[in-house]
Amino acid sequence: MKPNYRQIAEQIIENIGGKENVEQAAHCVTRLRLTLKNQELVDQEALLEVPLVKGAFLNAGVYQIVIGAGDVDRVYAEFIQLTGLQATTIADVKSSGAAKMNPFQKLIKVFSDVFMPIIPAIIVAGLLMGINNLFGIEFGGKTMIDRYPNLQGLWDLINMMANTAFVFLPALVGWSATKRFGGSEILGIVMGLMLVHPDLLNAWNYGQSALKGEIPTFNILGLFEIEKVGYQGQILPVLAAAYVLSTIERWLKKRVPNAIQLLVVPITTITLTGFLALAVIGPVTRQVGDWITIGVVNTFEAVPLLGALLFGALYAPLVITGMHHMFIAVDLQLIGQSGTTFIWPMIAISNIAQGSATLAMLFLAKNVNDKNMASTSALSAYFGITEPAMFGVNLRFKYPFYAALVGSAIASAFIAVSGVLAPAIGVGGLPAFISIVPGSILSFIVGMVIAIIVPVACTFLFHYVSTKRAKKAALKKAA
């Protein structure tokens, strides 16, 4: 039966204190995100009884109601119409609640605001690279390309499409970051493209030139030189450059007369930021990025088992707080520096583990609505969207959530010790195996099996223990 989205929106409004209690409203893939005037007016228990509502919580001053992919768009449309509010972006809503955030939360919010809009492009690129990986799998000592040379052209075409988002990643980040920092998005794109201009050396050519001691430079008036080095796949340089660009542009707009702004502001902004990006920002942030990459890699290489156990156990709780967005930047930085990442495979494993624990609740739940929610949420988690599973099922019953953490930790430890790597970010669920380096696919599939079996088994075990304790408590109380 098709949900009555208008009625659901009405019930949500009623249980959050009425439309007068809402300042701003936006939505992401799965959640309504609201800033409320008075949090105490929310009737949490009644809200959780509303159809389609799978969870609700306050995070960093923003009240979030988990509904699910697809349905959230329709509920939001009715919500906006009923409250009379203007549609706003997630960034606007987050900014409204930012005063209640500490500096670390604000930093995480910046990463979230910048990377969320470009995630679809990154995932598409990852999936296409995953399809390309299938061409590289060896059977009997030969790849598909070796066996069927006519596939070479198709492979080259898919490879080109897959690499586009990563080759021009600074342009995507430049657009999103400049928008986040209050600058002109088109100037952000230009800045990002400038950092990957063909006249600048890419990482491979830079390494070759450095070995020969022949790095080309821009000679600036005979006073000093700037190395002709590009920042393909780099995150920190373009983030810092976008912030500087936006700051310069805003400063100029306040001081340059309107009549000549179009002539003066863009050219001055691009020239100053471009000079600073290539002369100062790029070299400094590239070094910082190298240190971060080396630190993360060395830590996991030194104690892969412990690091993976902790990451597997903690990633899902980080999703609850929103702090998981920072790992997108770390993943992309690792891919840009070394060509692969070991973090994203563990993220995919965590999603599978959450889905598996939810699937177990399909058989354990007594309520028909709970069973329906478990089935749809498990499917969603298996394709990378875990919020419905976590908030709608696992956190409600608690023990499935703990079971998922156990399974995620064990499976993550296994794939980390096995050296599983991914050349790109793809769909973080069951399809993730196609985005794994061909030589690691078998180990990753074993990790997926662990992430399915262990959470299901632990959920049944924890349910049995929980039920037994409840019965003992009931008997003791009756006595």
Image (tube, grey):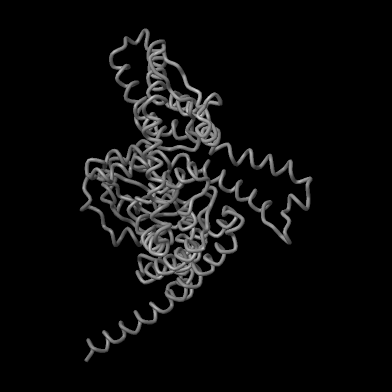
Give the residue at x 38% y 67%: 401
Point out residue 252 in the picture as x, y percentages from the top left corner. 32, 16
Query: How many numbered discs, if any?
Result: 0
Q: Is residue 326 positioned above or below 360 on the image?
A: above
Q: Nearer the viewer, residue 363 or 284?
A: 284
Task: Say whether residue 391 is visible.
Answer: no
Q: Is residue 109 positioned above or below 305 on the image?
A: above
Residue occupying the far front of the picture: 212
Residue occupying the far top of the picture: 259
Q: Quadrant of the C terminus?
A: bottom left
Q: Is residue 466 positioned above or below 169 on the image?
A: below
Give the residue at x 66% y 42%: 158
Q: Nearer the viewer, residue 454 or 159?
A: 159
- In terms of image quadrants, where is residue 139? bottom right
Give the residue at x 53% y 45%: 339
Task: Tell whether 335 sits left or right of 152.
Answer: left
Residue occupying the far bottom of the picture: 479
Point out residue 389 in the picture as x, y percentages from the top left corner. 43, 62
Q: Is residue 69 positioned above or below 225 on the image?
A: below
Task: Tell whether 115 sits left or right of 168.
Answer: left
Point out residue 260 in the picture as x, y percentages from the top left corner. 37, 8
Task: Tell whether 259 sits left or right of 212.
Answer: left
Task: Say whether residue 204 is visible.
Answer: yes
Point out residue 269 in the picture as x, y percentages from the top left corner. 38, 18
